[in-house]
Image (tube, rainbow, N blue to C red):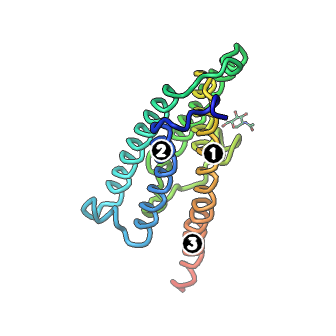
């Protein structure tokens, strides 16, 4: 294991910290917004600006995490098997399809749809069912994990595969928090819309 991953390099722990911190941060921030309108208040009472602020913060945190990941990989040993032609080809395909999933998801959802707008009360009119959501239910997360794996294979770093496994687990955990919460926000709207005419009678 020592020859595969160098655990004596501090940079790998910075990457681990960033990978765990990011989804923890945006779930905590989004729930604070949902329950106490914390971010809307910070944005002077404007929910849309609050959501944009969160979007910029999440995006910046993502850039920092990606930089820490690449920095960690540079200090890790490479593995000849991983550097074979097959892996390089696979790496390119993974990074390209990962980016297609992430970018097409952002395109389909828009900024508020991508960055937890529903926690701010900014709901989508309809559920998006076209590409990439007919390929995977969480294209942002799976696309991002694919890019991490592709980068690991491209540089032939077993440590990158280990960190990608962590990314995957962290996203899986995030989804178990986010999916039921989002479903409930939309179910609530549906109940309220159905309930409205009865109250008017
Ligand atoms: C997903 O939807 C797109 C249109 O948005 C369509 O072109 C594509 O064939 C669909 N893919 C699958 C796997 O259903």
In the rendered image, the residue lying farthest to the top is 85
The quadrant of the image that shows the N terminus is top right
Instruction: Decide which of tag 1 and tag 2 comes sooner along the chain.
Output: 2
How many angstroms separate mark 3 from mark 2 (CA)? 22 Å
| Image region (quadrant) for ligand 1 | top right
Whether label 2 lies within 8 Å of ligand 1 gets the answer: no
Query: Mark 1, residues whose alpha carbon is within 10 Å: few (<14), some, or many (≥20)?
Result: many
In the rendered image, the residue lying farthest to the left is 44
How many angstroms separate mark 1 from mark 3 (CA)? 30 Å
Q: Residue 147's x, y, as percent?
A: 58, 32
Whether label 3 lies within 8 Å of ligand 1 gets the answer: no
- Secondary structure state at the residue bearing disc 1: helix
Q: Which residue is mark 1?
A: 168
Q: Is residue 40 left or right of residue 84?
A: left
Q: Residue at x 41, y 42 (%)?
A: 59
Within the image, what quadrant is residue 156 found in? top right
Is residue 97 among the parts visible in the rendering?
no
Q: Residue 163's x, y, as percent?
A: 59, 39
Q: Is residue 199 left or right of residue 131?
A: left
Q: Residue 44's x, y, as percent?
A: 24, 62
Q: Nearer the viewer, mark 1 or mark 2?
A: 1
Mark number displayed over residue 12? none
Q: Nearer the viewer, mark 1 or mark 3?
A: 1
Q: Which residue is mark 3?
A: 188
Instruction: Decide which of tag 1 and tag 3 comes sooner along the chain.
Output: 1
104 relative to 31, above or below: above
Mark number displayed over residue 110? 2
- Secondary structure state at the residue bearing disc 3: helix
**Looking at the image, do the residues carrying marks 3 and 2 touch, with CB atoms under 8 Å apart?**
no
Instruction: Decide which of tag 3 and tag 2 comes sooner along the chain.
Output: 2
193 relative to 137, above or below: below
């Amino acid at each position: 294991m020592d020859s595969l991953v160098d655990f004596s390099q501090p940079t790998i722990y910075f990457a681990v910290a960033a990978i765990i911190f990011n989804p923890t941060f945006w779930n905590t921030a989004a729930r604070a917004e949902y329950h106490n309108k914390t971010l809307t208040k910070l944005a002077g009472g404007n929910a849309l600006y609050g959501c944009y602020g969160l979007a910029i913060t999440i995006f910046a945190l993502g850039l920092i995490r990606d930089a820490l990941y690449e920095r960690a990989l540079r200090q890790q040993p490479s593995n000849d098997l991983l550097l074979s032609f097959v892996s390089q080809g696979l790496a390119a395909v993974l990074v390209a399809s990962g980016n297609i999933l992430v970018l097409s998801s952002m395109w389909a959802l828009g900024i508020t749809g991508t960055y937890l707008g529903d926690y701010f009360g900014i709901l989508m009119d309809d559920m998006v069912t076209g590409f990439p959501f007919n390929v995977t239910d969480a294209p942002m997360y799976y696309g991002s994990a694919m890019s991490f794996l592709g980068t690991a294979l491209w540089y032939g770093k077993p440590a990158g595969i280990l960190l990608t496994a962590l990314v995957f687990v962290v996203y899986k955990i995030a989804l178990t928090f986010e999916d039921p919460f989002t479903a409930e926000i939309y179910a609530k709207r549906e109940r309220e819309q159905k309930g409205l005419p009865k109250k008017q009678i």
